[in-house]
Image (spheres, rainbow, N blue to C red):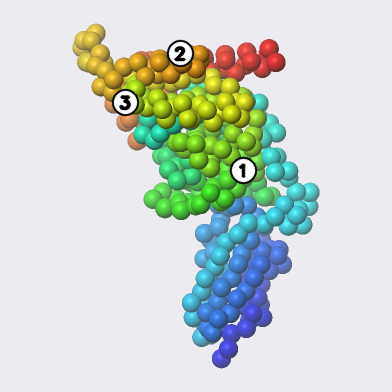
Amino acid sequence: MEITKEQVIEILKGVNDPELGKSLVDLGMIKDVEISGNNVKVKVALTMAGCPLKSKIKSDVEEAISRIPGVGEIKVVLTTMTSEERARIFGQAPSEMEGMKGIKNVIAVASGKGGVGKSTISVNLAIALAKMGYKTGILDADMHGPDIPIMLGIKERPVGSRGMLLPLEKYNVKMISTGVLAGEGTPIVWRGPLVNKAIKEFLGRVQWGELDFLVVDLPPGTGDAPLTVASTIPIKGAIIVTTPQKVALSDVRRCIGLFLKNKIPIIGIVENMSYLKIPGQDEVMDIFGKGGGEKIAKAFKVPLLAQIPIDSEIRKGGDEGRPIATKEGTESAKIFLDLAQKVADSVLSVKENA
């Protein structure tokens, strides 16, 4: 028996959007049905690129189509609705940057290369700002290596509400990341255009609410994600993370160049893995060399904001989902609080003088 498009559409009328409780067909989410012999290909348009329920929607569509007698291979392709299509569902569609309305200051944390501990700096900075009484959020914009959920100990999935995504929260810090959308261990194989679209939706279609600071943890380098963030939103300043090696300086220069080209001020340099303190002694060891962060800060006439030591407790805290900034009284926690104070003073003083 030959399978028809009408059969597929009819059976999909019984598949509802989990959030809206209405048929995918009635909502206009079924964009195309292709039949090739007994094989079926369906294109489904999600309300947002980062829809937390996309896996369920896909599996529900596959399960429904599998009930058609004689059906062969089933392929479900997920796309995203346009603003106009969303408006037809939700009425007045939120603007592309709706979620940004209540955010006062956006801070980008960047690095010229990977492996310098940029995400560790982002998480502990955000927590330190929150401990100082600021309403703080963190956006994990590293689409291919989203480590922020692990460092915060967040395993829950976010939910949607009327075309907007609700951030998760831990340690008084709101957070969104592809890591909590895809699930732990799931590979995220996204090319440039989809990365750009997802970042824009994380910025504009997440209900961040009122925030004093949104810390954006960028992927290393000067690729699609940093360019999208730099050109899409009004960033108050960027923090550049490096290590002491002089070999890292050329990478840092390119990274700084990206922000200066987009007229984004550099708040300062953070030198991570700066030194190792020998237990029971005043002596320190410069495991990764010395002077790299100071040299780049002087070259660009920006502050060297902090020198973060090699501390097993920092690594342990990130692995266990309890970052060092949450732990009272430790030397490393004090360094991050001092860093947060310098960042807040820098950003807020610029705003007052503007």
> Can the viewer see residue 300 in this picture?
yes
Name the amino acid, label 3: Glu
Height in image: 245 above or below 32? above
Q: Find numbered disc 3 in the image and state the secondary structure of the residue it sits on.
A: helix
In the foreground, 223 or 129: 223
Along the line of sight, the residue nearer the viewer: 272 or 161:
272
- Specify which label sits upstream in the sequence, 2 or 3: 2
- Residue located beneath label 3 in the image: 313
- Which three-letter amino acid code belongs to the residue tagged 1? Lys
**Earlier-in-chain disc, 1 versus 3:** 1
The reply to whether the C-beta atoms of the residues labelled 2 and 1 are less than 8 Å apart is: no
- Quadrant housing the N terminus: bottom right
Report which residue position mark 2 lands on.
298
Q: Which of marks 2 and 3 is in front?
A: 2
Would you place residue 165 above or below residue 119 in this image? below
Circle 3 packing at 10 Å, graded few (<14), some (14-19), many (20+), is some
Mark 1, residue position? 200
| Residue positioned most to the top | 282
Identify the secondary structure beneath mark 1. Answer: helix
Task: Return the x and y of residue 80 as percentages of the image width and height.
Answer: 63, 56
Residue at 33% over, 23% down: 245
- Measured as percent of width and height from the top left, residue 115 is found at 36, 34
| CB within 8 Å, label 2 to label 3 | no
